[in-house]
Amino acid sequence: MRKPIGWLGFVNNIPLNWKFTLIYLFCVLLPILTINVLFFRQMSENIQSREQNNLQMTIERAAKNATDMIEGGVTLSHSVATDRILYEMLDKEYADVVDFYESFNELLTGKMRPFMSAYTHVENISVFTENPTVVSGSNFFVLDEAAKRSLWYEAASNSPSAVNVLMYTDVDPMNAKASKEYFSIVRKLNEYPLYGRYAKYLRIDLKLSSFDEILEQEKPYMTLSMLDPQGRVLFPSSQFMGQTGSADSGEDEGLMFHSSLGKASYIRGWTLVGLAEEGRFQTAVQSSKRFIWVLAAISTLLPTSLIFIMLRSYNYRIRRLSRHMDKATNEKFDLIELREGKDEIGGLIRSYNRMAAQIESLINDVYKLEIQQKDMQLEQVRAEMKLLQSQMNPHFLFNTMNALLVVSVKNGYTEVADIIRNLSQLLRRMLSWSDSAVTLQDELHFTEMYLKIEKFRFADRFDYVFNIEDETASCLVPKMCIQPLVENACKHGLQAVKGKRFIRIEARRADNYLFVLVEDNGKGMDEDRLNEIRSMMNGSLDSDENVGMRNVYKRLRLHYGERVDFYIDSHPDKGTRISFRIPALSADEGGRRNVLGSASG
């Protein structure tokens, strides 16, 4: 079959519903929306650009008026600062108050009145001097300690610039208990070094209402605020609280405009910020917006309806096919029973029905094969367990016989009955073997019978102790999982000990796990021997070395799989500790089910 080339093969791989969708999106909907959006955006940008230019001109006009007002105050300060007579009178030391007032009345009276008359925005002009012979009054004041603690003096004295413009809060001269806001131009009077005996400062207070009027005039167009370089709102003066960023907080969303007041050092960084409501020019845009969207809706609705009618003709079959494919993910391969049709969808449905029938047949075959494999695996596990059981080391029986012989000779057969009874029970338990689990209590009872026989062997030189928690007695464990460990301790650990021999068996339950410990005070082993035994745990049982320990480990793995933790710890001349941790399955909780089945889970 000839393969389609390039782009044609790519198009053939696209589903039919996606083809219609792509045609609708890129050939109908997208062009219509793009044209309308671009037209609307261009018109909106024109309206917005015109309004923004008008608003920018508004804020620049307000900034110019505010700058002119400040520049006028600076110019006024320059005029006062160049008055040589003023320097001479403020630097002169007066004999007494009368001497000062004579000079004041002759040269200083009304000296500031022409300046204030020529500049209507000035609220007050004050001249401060450190000359102690000057009497405070009118426009002239002694620069005492109280004045030096004021904000305007700290700013002027610490500034390298001769002229400083600042806004601050100070004591109201009309009411000493109240405060007042000032907008002042502070200038150091140092134009004539000849009269520099005492420091002199000029403070011109401008009217706050004049700045508020400038901002209020532009209120119909935007809300204006004047900010200093630190971002504090200076005007409107009602908002002046020394807050940073107050002009932006608490305002409705809108267009933000900025205009610098000037590049002079004393007002560098001062800005005028204006916030204009977007609704100012949104009204003009809305009328055009409605017309454009109505046109877009009509031009979109007609082709959409036509395409919907075409898609509806095959939508039902696609949905049926999709539902059956979802069922297939849950292993339900039902056939689709409907009129397939002769188009691409019909061919797809026919292919799906063939595939579903084949998969159903394959699944049945695979299930049968898996059942056979599971039966074979189960038989293999049972055979391996039988092999492990058949390799139990009977060495302890010969030791028992020797012990019986010694005790019989020494004691006149008085204790032989107990030994024979324990031995018979041991043999009966070993011969009546089954795959079922036993409770820990039964396993410990079996282990204790063996320990009693060993105690006959060693007499007073051997003892043992059980530390068993009550809640562990009903836990299920595999048969012969503790006795081989005890036998291993007696055979390899305690055999060479000359002093008191001791074995401790402990069992406790924690976090749904059963923990079992067998500890002896035997000869122990070094680290190399311990590592060698650990490496042999997964080896073959053909070797006679450590068969009991390896047997227990392998049977635990067969019962519980990876959920077994087996530990061996030993030190030379300090004994050996063998412990394991397995899941705690209780007979009271229905745990007498097949333990082999739980290991596979």
Image (cartoon, rainbow, N blue to C red):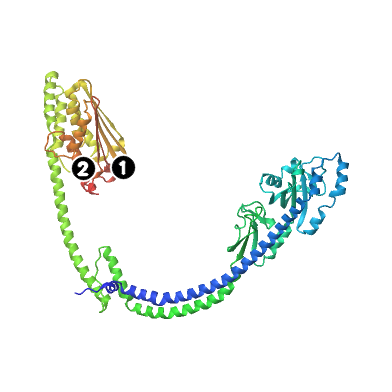
| Of residues 61 and 550, the one drawn nearer to the viewer in this rendering | 61
In which quarter of the view is residue 143 placed?
Answer: top right
Q: Is residue 262 visible?
A: yes
Look at the numbered disc 2 and give the secondary structure of its residue. helix
Q: Is residue 565 above or below residue 462?
A: below
Residue 39: percent from left, percent from top: 50, 75
In which quarter of the view is residue 246 placed?
Answer: bottom right
Q: State if disc 1 and disc 2 touch (CB < 8 Å).
A: no
Residue 584: percent from left, percent from top: 28, 42
Disc 2 residue type (three-letter): Arg
* Left or right: where 137 falls relative to 429: right
Q: Residues within 10 Å of mark 1 (few under 14, many from 20)?
A: few
Residue at the extreme front: 194
Residue placed at 73% from the left, 59% from the top?
A: 210
| Of residues 460 and 253, the one drawn nearer to the viewer in this rendering | 253
Residue 45: percent from left, percent from top: 54, 71
Residue 169: percent from left, percent from top: 71, 49
Q: Is residue 449 visible?
A: no
The CA distance from mark 2 to mark 1 is 18 Å
Q: Residues within 10 Å of mark 2 (few under 14, many from 20)?
A: some
| Of residues 154 and 237, the one drawn nearer to the viewer in this rendering | 154
Which residue lies under the disc numbered 1? 512
> Which label belongs to residue 272?
none
> Which label belongs to residue 557?
2
Question: Which is in the foreground here, disc 2 or disc 1?
Answer: 2
Look at the numbered disc 1 and give the secondary structure of its residue. loop
